[in-house]
Amino acid sequence: MVLNEISIQNKHTKKKIRNSNKVISSYGEQVSRKYIERINIIKKSNNIDELIAMRTLRCHPLKGADKGKWSIKLTGFMRLIFTLQGEKLEIVKIEEVSKHYDD
């Protein structure tokens, strides 16, 4: 099993993640559950291609001002936005959880 280092860049997201009640009150139970599930999937993945191959995640690179970031579907329009360092997901930085209307 590959354990990837994960850090959270967004200060608001970091504060919420430290307290599970804040996560649920901010994002709702379903999004919070998916967030934790997706983090665990990232931790177990060997590389970005494994995440892309999981079609239900809709993992893809973002464009425009967000170029260099990646998106994974949580629920509906909610996305987990992250960046990578290294091709083997050696370090993953969670940028934010956001509503994403146009990828």
Image (cartoon, helix red, strand yellow):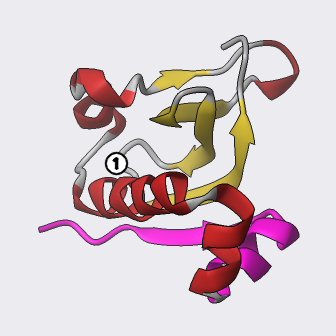
Q: Label 1 neighbourhood size at 10 Å, few (<14), some (14-19), many (20+)?
A: some
Q: Residue at x 81, y 63 (%)?
A: 10
Location of residue 39 (image quadrant): bottom left
- State the image coordinates of residue 90 (x, y, percent, origin top left): 41, 60
Quadrant of the image for the N terminus?
A: bottom left
Q: Is residue 52 above or below residue 36?
A: above
Q: Residue at x 60, y 37 (%)?
A: 79
Q: Is residue 13 above or below residue 37?
A: below
Q: Residue furthest bottom?
A: 19
- State the image coordinates of residue 97 (x, y, percent, origin top left): 68, 49
- State the image coordinates of residue 41 (x, y, percent, origin top left): 28, 54
Q: Which residues are magenta?
A: 1-18
Q: Residue at x 51, y 62 (%)?
A: 29
Location of residue 71 (image quadrant): top right
Q: Tell me, yes or no, whether the highlighted magenta stretch contains residue 11.
A: yes
Looking at the rendered structure, the number of numbered marks drawn on it comes to 1
Q: Residue at x 85, y 71 (%)?
A: 11
**Secondary structure under the numbered disc 1 in the rendered image:** loop
Location of residue 77 (image quadrant): top right
- State the image coordinates of residue 17 (x, y, percent, origin top left): 64, 77
Horizontal relation, residue 39 to residue 24: left or right: left
Task: Say what amino acid the circle numbered 1 marks.
Answer: Lys
Q: Nearer the viewer, residue 87 or 59?
A: 59
Quadrant of the image for the C terminus?
A: top right
Horizontal relation, residue 52 to residue 102: left or right: left
Q: Is residue 61 above or below residue 37?
A: above
Q: Is residue 18 above or below residue 87?
A: below
Residue that mark 1 sits on:
88
Q: Tell me, yes or no, whether the highlighted magenta stretch contains residue 3.
A: yes
Q: Residue furthest left?
A: 1
